[in-house]
Amino acid sequence: MRLQDRVALVTGGASGIGRAIVRGYAREGAHVVIADVQPAAEAEQEVVVQGRRALAVKVDVARREEVEALVRQVLDAFGTIDILVNCAGVQSNQPFLEATDEDFDRVLAVDLKGTFNCAQAVARGMIERKRGKIINIASQSGALYVRNLAPQYHAAKAGVIHLTRVLAVELGRHGINVNAIAPALVLTPPLKARWEASPEMRAYHLGKVALGRAATPEDIVGPAIFLASSDSDYVTGHTLFVDGGFTAQ
């Protein structure tokens, strides 16, 4: 088991990609904290049935005080945080000319500021221990244009990718690895709903994928395990595009 007895904090772990990573980390021997604005009892139980310790905490990552309270709670319960996965995020489909201040602020607050808040709060303890793994979930839309996704979402995910590079340099001397995963077209309920409403959009999106299919949340788990394990000890500042060849075209 590559993550035996490590303690992982996964934001956005109640559903989708985050929940798949929670299950994958537990299979690899990690104890997992699931932080989400949504109820996470089911995800918590999926860890427990594998014989690992688990904790579900309700938190809004856009609120610094909630994040700092979360980290204190995790340290009190587990004594350490070895792995942080910043997976909490929201999307937007608002066209540029119709985008509101409220939607712009909402997307940037969760997707970019939330990633910053969690990394900052967790990194302090990692610096003391001189080791740690931080994994930010970005998107292919942080590197190129993706139709039907709002400009504010593109901007937030581009910020996550560059923040990953900056933090890798800032924290590298402390033995902390910081990397990102950029998925594309992960078949979660929001994407399914959009495709059902627009077969044309589905055809357009799949036409951009070299492998010809959407990803499942489980497709992201292997890369997330790699970046959390000792196998990636000399990898930092990198964004791994898990996109079926979307960005290759």
Image: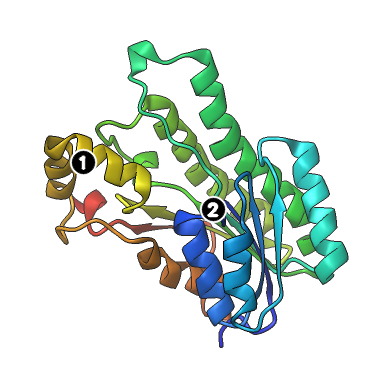
Identify the residue at image location x=21%, y=41%: 196
Direction from residue 214 to residue 134 in the image, left or right: right
Which of the 4 image quarters holds residue 144?
Answer: top left
Neighbourhood count class around disc 1 (C-alpha, 10 Å): few under 14, some 14–19, many 20 upward: few
Residue that extends furthest to the top in the rendered view of this protein:
97
Up the image or down, 111 lies above or below 12; here it is: above
Identify the residue at image location x=49%, y=38%: 90
Q: Nearer the viewer, residue 91 or 145?
A: 91
Q: Is residue 16 visible?
A: yes
User: What's the distance in space between the residues labelled 1 and 2, CA to CA?
Assistant: 29 Å
Q: Amino acid at mark 1?
A: Glu
Percent position (x, y) of residue 236?
A: 54, 62
Neighbourhood count class around disc 2 (C-alpha, 10 Å): few under 14, some 14–19, many 20 upward: many
Q: Nearer the viewer, residue 192 or 113?
A: 192
Identify the residue at image location x=82%, y=47%: 69
Q: Earlier in the sequence, mark 1 or mark 2?
A: 2
Residue that extends furthest to the bottom in the rendered view of this protein:
1
Residue ID for mark 2? 136
Percent position (x, y) of residue 204?
A: 14, 40
Q: Secondary structure at mark 1?
A: helix
Q: Amino acid at mark 2?
A: Asn
Percent position (x, y) of residue 229?
A: 56, 76
Q: Secondary structure at mark 2?
A: strand
Direction from residue 178 to residue 58 in the image, left or right: right
> In the picture, which quadrant includes the N terminus?
bottom right
Residue ID for mark 1? 196
Residue that extends furthest to the right in the rendered view of this protein:
76
Percent position (x, y) of residue 109?
A: 60, 31
Up the image or down, 43 lies above or below 3; here it is: above
